[in-house]
Image (tube, grey):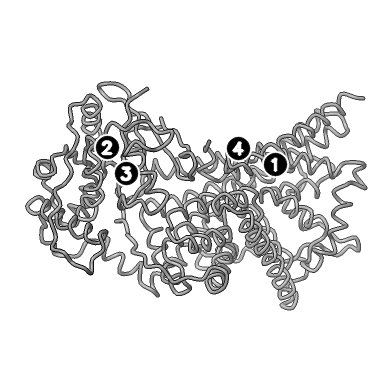
Amino acid sequence: MSVQMIVTGLGVLLSIIYVVYRLRKEWKGHSAGCGHCPLKKLG
Amino acid sequence: MNPAVAIIGNPNTGKTTVFNALTGMRQHVGNYPGVTVERKTGEVTTSVGVVELVDLPGTYSLSAQSPDEMVVVNVLRGHQQGEYPITGVVVVVDASNLRRNLFLASQVMEIGLPMVLVLNMTDVAEGRGIIVDAYELSKRLNVPVVVARANAGEGMDELREVIAEIVSGKVSPVRAPQLPELPPDPNETPTSKDSIARYQWIRQQLQGTVRRVAMTRSPLSDRIDHVLTHRLWGTLIFSVIMVLVFQAIYSWAAPLQDTIDKAFIAMGAWVGGLLPEGMLRSMVVDGVFKGVGSVLAFLPQIVFLFLFIAILEDCGYMSRAAFLMDKIFARIGLSGKSFIPMLSSFACAVPGIMSTRTIENPRDRLVTILVSPLMSCSARLPVYTLMIAAFVPPVTWFGGVVGLQGLTLFLMHCVGFVVAIPVVYVLKRTLLKGATPPFVMELPVYKRPSVKTVCWRSMDRGRDFVKNAGTIILALTVVIWALSYFPTPKDNYFSRIGHIIEPAVKPLGWDWRIGMAVVSAFPAREVVVAALGTTYNLGKEVTEESETLRQALHTATWPDGRPVYSLAVALSIMVFFALCCQCGATVATIKRESHSWRWAIFAFSYMTGLAYVAALVVYQGALRCGWGGAL
């Protein structure tokens, strides 16, 4: 397995984890995470 | 633990300006546990040390009818979970409207904490010929009175000193006002009797403390309002202002947008040159630079939009706009209280929905929650500007002041509002029946917008946009890139799923790429731009002369060689985005605020269905008008 494949795989994996984390966080209401929201600092 | 002092006042008294002037940037924003009421605290440095200042929600009374008022009462009485015990209270009052403002002050006095009255906006009062004898008022109420003009920073040092005296115990707890005894009247409820007695007491306090100087002309603010709140002229002026704002966003932001766009292409080409051919290079260039770069290019539009909104809000004009719209909403069964959350939703639906907590009637609150996401939030702006810039001709009139592109952007912002009217009408007559509640609206006086406030607000929103692009949009773009690259770039998962959904989106004039970009934008709307940027550029040679996303849309074709995009397709995409509920945060907020999944699912379903039907009607209608050809 080349270094390219490992770095790309890691990038995709981290992205998936981050997307799931953000969606979960928004769902639970800890963050109004649309990014335009002044209430994003909540909790 | 630092001693804590609460700051309270009616809306539009400059309470937040006083809070900001005292605390500067040392602020913390949070939520009160169990309720969605914002908790804001800041630190004030005084001669006796640091004092925690708790900014309570603006309220007219302590009658505890809405969640906001309940929190205020609980904090002041020391019953609010998670709040510091309050040592004293700063009551901010509008010197030009003391009679109404002292109603809340009289209720705060009954709590029996040490208190200071901040006589704010004295310049406005003087402009209206109202002179307040602060010394006499202080003697009568038996509380310290600080004369202030918070927007100019006047009176803040004195207020700091009084706060220091309060926390060091030098100010005695205030005595409850001696309300006059009223003769028994069977027609009066205890609440109305209390209000009458309180206003009688206020009149007694103000006799001899407030003097009115005869003015030769009515105040300038009133004269302007005669025009700006006029049913015909006011609406016309509002429309002209909005068209000019959107045109300015277009004209001023376009050169900056092009610069950012080209900078990302150049950076992509440079980074691409450093990396060897392969999947990593494709991910960095096609995913990160093309995807996120396409979204970040809209930063100037976002900053300009919020700059104009902040100017209009800060000078007091937005309240006039709300007043004008209140007349329309009253006819269909909602009061102005519902319009204010809708106005906030033009920036973002999440705080808009949360601000419906000021509406006491649960049915009206729910109707407002359900229609607020229809207002065009700033996340829709990149989609509108991309489509308009690519497919609406740059025709201008009146020497370039008004243009077709700016006008189209204005009309797109009107779509959600116009559709909300029949939605409210139907909801108020079917699922959520109820009478129109009365609403009295206060119009703050006009003032010169503070440069600091306006710049701070627009920069803050700009920073949020960049942060968002660098986090969730970046992550989603990488996921979209991976779906578009594997198992092979020619036959990838993204196109396989896209071809499955294509029959559903084809009646709207969309190819599978648009369909998939729209589907991927359900967690966050801006992702559509990133997804289009990635899918239309994947596999193409990247140089500094590479085409921008706008150019890529023009050259996109169906398999038979026909161009995908036309004015009809652009309009169909924009209308879909204007009405669709593509925001995970909004759906989650509806669920939280309505305490029910049912309403969150209902809002998502009706908006998505409405968006599909409207996009279909617009596309088919545009085809009939002959707007289906290549541009």
Amino acid found under the numbered disc labelled 4: Lys
Q: Which residue is mark 1?
A: B292
Residue at x-position 47% and y-position 37%: B30
Q: Secondary structure at mark 1?
A: helix
Whether discs 3 and 2 lie on one chain: the answer is yes
Residue under pointer 2: B89
Marks 1 and 3: which is nearer the front? 3
Point out the tag, 1 or 3, that comes first from the N-terminus. 3
User: Could you say which is closer to the camera, residue B287 or residue B248?
Assistant: B287
Crowd rating for badge 2 (residues with CA inside 10 Å; few <14, some 14–19, many 20+): many
Depth check, mark 3 against mark 2: the one in front is 2
Q: CA distance from mark 3 to mark 2?
A: 12 Å
Instruction: Determine which of the numbered discs, if any, sits on residue B467 in the image.
Output: 4
The image position of residue B589, as x and y in percent, is: 58, 49
Q: Write down the residue under mark 3.
A: B15
User: The disc numbered 4 marks a residue on which chain?
Assistant: B
Residue B29 is left or right of residue B165, and the answer is: right
- Residue at the spot x=84%, y=45% of the render? B484
Amino acid type, callout 1: Val
Tag 2 secondary structure: strand
B86 on left or right of B195: right
CA–CA distance in space, label 2 to label 4: 37 Å
**Amino acid residing under circle 3:** Lys
